[in-house]
Amino acid sequence: MQWSLLRPVGLVPAALVLTTIAAGAEGGKSASPSEFLLIVQIVLLIAVGRGLGELMQRIGQPSVIGELLAGIILGPSLFGWIWPEAQAAIFPKAPEQKAMIDGIAQVGILLLLLLTGMETDLKLVRKVGKAAVAISIAGILVPFACGFALGEFLPDALLPNPQARLVASLFMGTALSISSVKIVAVVVREMNFMRRNVGQIIVATAVIDDTIGWIIIAVIFSLASHGTLDIASVAKAVLGTLAFLAVSFTIGRRLVFQLIRWANDNLVSAAAVITVILLLMCVMAMITHAIGVHTVLGAFVAGILVGESPILTRQIDERLRGLISSFFMPVFFGLAGLAADLSVLRDPNLLMLTGLLVVIASVGKFGGAFVGGTLGGLSTRESLALASGMNARGSTEVIIATIGLSIGVLSQNLFTMIVTMAIVTTMAMPPMLRAALAKLPMDKEEKERLEREEFEKRGFVANLERPLLAVDESVNATFAAHIAGLIAGMRGLPITVLHVGKRAKDQEKVRDEAASHEAVVKKAAETVSANGDGDAGSVDVVTRARRAELGETITEEARKGFDLLVVGIDKVVATKDRFDRRIEDIAATFEGPLAIVAAKGRHAKQPVPEALNILVPVSGSGVSKRGAEVAVALAQGGSGSLRVIYVATTRDKGAQRGASRGLSQEAGILKDASDLAARYEVDITTTLRVNRAPEAAILREIDTTDVDLVVMGVDRIQGEHLSFGGVADAVLRQSKVSVLLVSSGETRQAPSEQA
């Protein structure tokens, strides 16, 4: 274990060897910019920063602390003190050379704010909005007042421009009032408190703090650029910021979603979506610069909008996070550490002022957040946890301090003091928050919510992101559109309607039919909304027409990231043991989950029913649970009834014959289905039929009840032709009511069958 902890530290001497090589290579050269020096600087910052970041994480600290310490070690605080010639050779102060690495750092600031925005959960903020807003206001006002007062009393020697003390005081107030949402979220998530009530309030409050802080920083930037308190320029900045935010979160939200979907669906080049996101970030940064505020606000808002886009957000987040974490973060925070010369703290006066700054920042933020939590209705222990979390400044503070230094609001010494404060408060936060959150009691309502969310985390329907609906011009297609609309309406999922019936030569007719299916989908989603479920108002529907062979068309669509294909075409089965050729072509070219719809009975005449009376067979298997999830979702969204029947599949018959078990296994499976329905407040009726073949039991239940739809979870059976097993085949062919087969993307071998 000791060796594993020392390995990251071993990167430090290895990296320092590079400094000797670089110093010798560059010693006799002129002061002109050097690409070699730039590469050496980047290698050192990444190697030492990532190495120390790894070590920090292993001892329970955020990796950003290691990246800051890397800059301090490589800067004048340590390396420059031990070997000033080598340090000056590697990190010369020549403006031309410094501008090269600074350019990378400036891009890094924008990317860090983009990532911070993507991690900002506005739904979480809305959920606990009132409490979080009240807590955030109190948590900002108190430390802001403390910071402003401190700025007013700072010695003139610490200010780059004593005549502009007001701007510096405002900046100090903002710097002391803001929290690092990234550090807070990491620790809360690490302790499995992200979904707890207090965890949600802590993170939501940090999000609001961050957002307000960036808006204030943007306005201060406008003040600093004019040198004095120009009412006209401040009004322009404030009104411009408000207009920018209003447009961004209305028109901009939909525009960003459409751009990301367009890039994902139409561009074939590598990482096309990433390219579009980076362009969006740059454009929005330029807009904020044009209205007189800092570019970071544009990047932050761009990140929020990208994070809210329902198209491939997880994949986008992973790719961007890898690039930013491995390259831009160690370079940016390393440079921040380089700029902080801790050797100045040998001056007793500066050391005392730095200690005072840490105390004022901590007491102000801790006290303000604690008072806000108490006023917001939190218990004393919850308020202590909140105050502990809010005190971490982390990466956000360093970014703000760097901006303040770059625009001339902070002096070099004041910058060093603020970075020191950020390091101290950030390192103190994790153990304090862990101690405050440990053994925090949980009430019954919170426990039930957490159990439901934990179930949904593993569930099928709750993890859907983007369904595809393949239809023709049949009645069956209309019923499939209704089913797809109910599923999409549960969580406001964007859905694509692919018309596979007619070829491109019949475009006008195809457009009319597609528009009809689109209307059915939207109407079904509105039904979900009317029942008080989901977020149906945000459902977005687009239509496409088939332009090539069916298999080729499905293959082309499948690459766009759809995670469920709902199929509604006129003919489902062909011969005694075969599906229709078009169904087989679709299944052969789409590897993900498949839902095949067969409208029968009353749905053949009325494909858009007012309610669904659903029967779902369960056997305890994974696929039957998936079918039950879909059935519960449809019953909840369509305000219908749900009947659950236990049937024993081939793999269950041995257990069923065991007399010693009695009915405990069957009763347990039915209870699981009842618990599932209860989580979504769906009333169900359960039925247990013994000594009967599964297909016979299901068909008997159909004949003796008023159900009009059977939902079955099935597996694909390996073979020459598409098959879901004998039970599904018998029900599909002999049922008098509609059937919905829901399969996973996996294929299993015969002969075991599922229901």
Image (cartoon, helix red, strand yellow):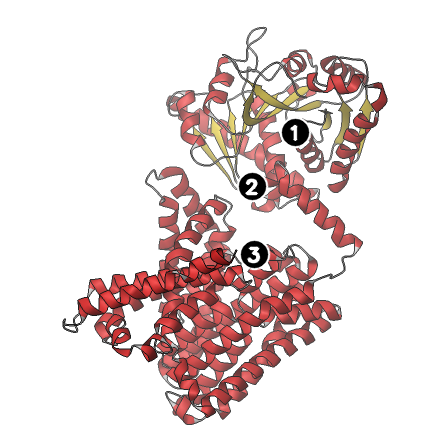
- Res 697 seen here: yes
Q: Earlier in the sequence, mark 2 or mark 1?
A: 2
Query: According to the image, label 3 marks what residue?
Result: 121
Tag in front: 3 or 2: 3
Measuring 46% from the left and 52% from the top, which residue is drawn there?
306
Q: List the residue tagged with mark 2.
A: 493
Q: Is residue 132 above or below residue 642?
A: below
Q: Secondary structure at mark 1?
A: helix
Circle 1 Cα neighbour tier, 10 Å, few/some/many (<14 / 14–19 / ≥20): some
Count neighbours of disc 2 (C-alpha within 10 A) and say few if under 14, some if 14 to 19, many if 20 or more. Answer: many
Residue 315 appears at what percent x and percent y?
46, 45
Visible residue check, residue 33:
no
Discs 2, 1 touching: Cβ within 8 Å: no
**Rounded to the nearest whole Å, what is the CA distance between mark 3 and mark 2?**
17 Å
**Label 3 element class:** loop
State the image coordinates of residue 391 (x, y, percent, origin top left).
58, 73
Residue 622 disc label: 1
Of the image marks 3 and 2, the number of the one nearer the N terminus: 3
Q: Is residue 556 left or right of residue 212?
A: left
Q: Is residue 292 above or below residue 265?
A: below
Q: Is residue 128 left or right of residue 670?
A: left
Res. 469 mark? none
Of 43 and 538, nearer the camera is: 43
Residue depicted at x 62% and y 37%: 461
Q: Amino acid at mark 3?
A: Asp
The residue lying at 59 percent from left, 78 percent from top is 362
What amino acid does circle 2 point to? Leu
